[in-house]
Image (cartoon, rainbow, N blue to C red):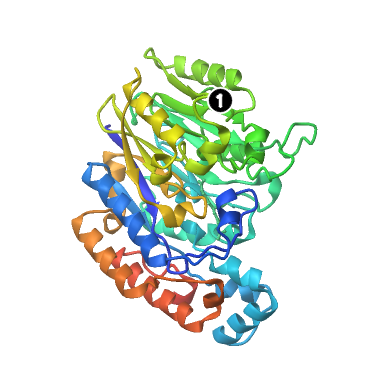
Amino acid sequence: MHAIEANFDGLVGPTHNYGGLSFGNVASKNNQAQASNPKAAALQGLVKMKALADMGFVQGVLAPHERPHIPTLKQLGFTGSDADILAAAAKQAPHLLACVSSASCMWTANAATVSPSADTHDGKVHFSPANLVNKFHRSIEHPITGAILRATFADTRHFTHHAALPSTDQFGDEGAANHTRFCQQYQQQGIEFFVYGQEAFNQQTVRPQKFPARHSLEASQAIAQRHGLQPQYTVYAQQNPAAIDAGVFHNDVIAVGNKNVHFYHEDAFLDTEKMQQDLQTAWALSNTDPLHFIEVTRQQVSLQDCVTSYLFNSQLISHTDDEMTLVVPAECQNNAAVWSYLQSLQQANNPITKVQVFDLKQSMSNGGGPACLRLRVVLNDKELAAVNQACLMNDDLFITLNQWVERHYRDRLMEADLADPQLLLESRTALDKLTQILKLGSIYDFQK
Ligand code: SUG
């Protein structure tokens, strides 16, 4: 049965701010304490979603989470009314208040790992929310992420939802940001490619020295196991520890793949040759057409330029059966080396024939480019029909969500504002309305 790849973007939440919370993510650190603009952030995201929908792609929306998250502050010992809790947290532990206020769930590439039904043992689409255990502010995402995914992909005849893996570094899981699927056509058996930062249980293996390896091999193996993937179509590769130390905290900052194309930097993997061989071996099991490796050299684009421009944090999407568009952030246009490389890429003999640029500065300033903002879900016709249709982008939803943002979002937020009880109220009012727009039911703690 015919299948497509849908993108489900995270709608930026009303508390989007620059908390400097992600050690190892250069943009997050560099922009700490800058004023943010949640309204602009949400509108920028909606423009990208609508543009892809207008190009004919299936585009979904995933709702933001309730923030500041009072239940987490209660779990940490804060008591009293919501206003008391906010005031006490702001005074005693402002870093904790920043963590429970982050709008980081916008980066839905980290929401979960998704295996299409063509690859899984029971012919269903499998979802595993990522535990995101390496960063406290993200480790609180998975329960509500799971609830949102279940409300979006509710039909148990087609969709299987797992809980997150155990919340320990040994099973550190950052979701689809470290997962790529190669295939000839989306409905066919694919190769699921898992990239990890460290082998957690084997301390003898190499790992980064400066910044954390957020994702473990053991997490990827457990995901493959529970999704029922076939071992011969499952490939693992280790990230280059030096790249992590240079600020490549997720593999999707330095590599992206789609169908028969793997586009990556020469410094992305610990053993590039092995990665190529392992993918070729799996590919040859069911394909005769070539798998394209587009390797960008240091000379063409330096590792540092990859990190600042987010060249590889692009969406690689098929606009025809054999031509692809690369959706890049505006930072690529502002970098002479990257922009010149992108011109040559479009002229070269490979499936990438178009480049499309989006202004996502609000998200980029926290280290989140176009690819971070979307979760890819391959769906056949029946599965697509079973998705919660209220979450799919179209002209009406675009207008409704723009009006919703205009009504409920602030255009400036600083750290001190996070303690404002009015912000909590605004956020809850907005989300309550959103659950009606997207027909999600009561998914938030404050709605229970
Ligand atoms: O996990 N930034 C996110 C960015 C995630 C990008 N996602 C992918 N590459 N797929 C992170 O580091 C920063 C929040 C702050 O500092 O306020 C943050 O969480």
Q: Nearer the viewer, residue 292 or 362?
A: 362
In the rendered view, tell whether residue 169 sits above or below residue 102: above
Q: Residue at x 37, y 66 (%)?
A: 39
Q: Residue furthest right?
A: 204
Q: Is residue 448 visible?
A: no
All told, the count of numbered labels is 1
The N terminus: image quadrant: top left
Query: Dividing the picture into quarters, in which one does residue 389 lie?
Result: bottom left
Q: Viewed as shown, does residue 115 lie left or right of 319? A: right
Q: Residue at x 72, y 43 (%)?
A: 210
Residue type indicated by callout 1:
Glu
Q: Viewed as shown, does residue 387 lie left or right of 248? A: left
Q: Position of residue 206 (x, y in %)?
A: 74, 32
Q: Is mark 1 within 8 Å of ligand 1?
A: no
Give the class, few, some or many, for how many residues have Cα within 10 Å of label 1's Cα (few <14, many ≥20). many
Q: Position of residue 16 (x, y in %)?
A: 47, 65
Which residue corresponds to mark 1? Answer: 266
Q: Viewed as shown, does residue 89 lie left or right of 372? A: right
Q: Position of residue 414 (x, y in %)?
A: 52, 71
Q: Is residue 88 visible?
A: yes
Q: Nearer the viewer, residue 201 or 46?
A: 46
Query: Dividing the picture into quarters, in which one does residue 447 lie?
Result: bottom left
The secondary element bearing badge 1 is classed as loop
In the rendered view, tell whether residue 88 sits above or below residue 47: below
In the rendered view, tell whether residue 284 sits above or below residue 402: above
Q: Position of residue 176 (x, y in %)?
A: 50, 42
In the rendered view, tell whether residue 108 sits above or below residue 17: above
Q: Residue furthest top?
A: 288
Q: Viewed as shown, does residue 113 lie left or right of 99? A: left
